Structures are given as structure tokens and as C-alpha cells.
Image: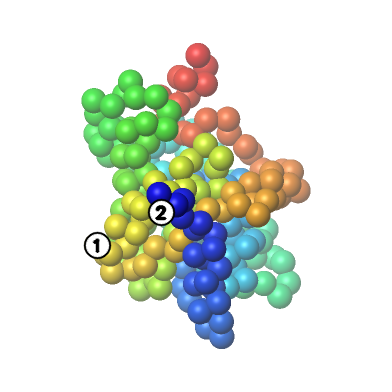
Amino acid sequence: MQKVNYQLRLDKLLEGCAGSTPLLLLHSCCAPCSSYCMEYLREYFRITVFYYNPNITDREEYEKRKEEEIRLINAYNEIPGKRSIGILDADYDPERYLEAVKGLEGCPEGGERCGVCFALRLEASAKAAAEHGFDYFCTTLTISPLKNAERLNTIGEQLGKRYGVPFLPSDFKKRGGYQRSIELSREYGLYRQDYCGCEFSRAERHH
């Protein structure tokens, strides 16, 4: 079975959007991952960042990452001649995540627990996109070399059909996207965490 090239799918979609500026709700896991995604996508969309990450079970860590996201958006909005980027915050709800992954605590990183986590965050994004009248929704998660783009796109497409808002196909790590995110993180002095956010990935990191 031939592997889907999600970057090519995005290219074709962007060609079809020429002459318009669709509204995009971009789910962001953190400032470093969103840095390249916002830089790239703001040329084609009017972006609002959706910060919904109940998997970050440590409150201090959650707030630190959110503050960095806001700081980066504010810095981007000071760049002359570029479209302004908005932010749509969400409630901090780690209990919802812990309930969703109950029984999967021992799964390895990248396993079934992560799939549940992706679906939880993307469903909240799809729902918010539908409620606020966005033309598309998307996630920064595909920029990570550790995240399976096909898995994320499949979940996103299914939820897009359910909520009536198309999921923007992506594999942001392609074409040097991940490397660019590292460069932007250095340029803006962003906090780069060394684990995904949940207590289980943090335990794996320590181990």
C-alpha cells in the first residue's frame, strides 16, 4: 500500500485557496512545535491558535508552555506586513485526559495511549472549529519526528467529517519544517521541553 504524502495534499489544497484567506484553527501542543507551522501557514490562512492540552498533567508545566505560546504569538504579531494570529484558550482539564487513558497507563510511548490522547485533543479542536465558524482545523503535532503523521491525519479527517469542518492535511516535519522549528526556537529563546507532557512520558524520560 502506497504511503500518503500529506505535504503534497496540502500543496494542492493551498493552490485551490489562491485568492482567498480561509480561517484556520490550529491546535498547538507547544510554542516550539507551532513556531514553524505559524510562520508557514500564516501566508495562506488567518490563524487562530487553539491551546488544548489536558495531557500535560503538571499544572506548572502546563502554564509554562502556555505562556511561551502566548509570548511567541505576540512576537509574531509584531512582525510588519504579516497577518495577525489569534489565540483561543481552553480550560485546563487533566482529569479528562486521565479518565480517557485509564487502563492504558503502561502502554509504551507511541502506542494506544497516545492514539487516545491525539483523538481527545483533535476532537476538542474539531468541535471548537465548528462552534466558531472556522473553514479548517489542523494540529502542530505532525511536526514531531516522534509522531505518526498518517495516524494524526486519519484521526483528524474522521473528526472533520463528524463535525463538518475539514481537517487540513499536514506533515509539517517535511521540507525542513522540524529543523526550522529548532532554528526559530533558538531565535526566540523558546522553552523546549524534553517530554510530551503526560506523567507517563515524563516517567519514561526519567527511566
In this view, the mark in front (2 or 1):
2
The residue positioned 31% from the left and 53% from the top of the image is 123
Query: Is 205 drawn above or below residue 99 in the view shown?
Result: above
The residue positioned 28% from the left and 64% from the top of the image is 161
Residue hosting label 2: 153
Q: Quadrant of residue 94?
A: top left
- Decide if residue 164 is on the left or right side of residue 59: left
Q: CA distance from mark 2 to mark 1?
A: 14 Å
Q: Position of residue 141 (x, y in %)?
A: 49, 47
Q: Quadrant of residue 77?
A: bottom right
Residue hosting label 1: 162
| Local crowd size for mark 1, using a 10 Å CA cut-off: few (<14), some (14–19), many (≥20) | few
Taking depth in this image into account, of 177 and 11 the one nearest to the observer is 11
Q: Position of residue 82 (x, y in %)?
A: 67, 72
Taking depth in this image into account, of 61 and 116 the one nearest to the observer is 116
- Which numbered disc flags the more N-terminal residue, 2 or 1? 2
Query: Is 89 drawn above or below residue 179 in the view shown?
Result: below
Q: Amino acid at mark 2?
A: Asn
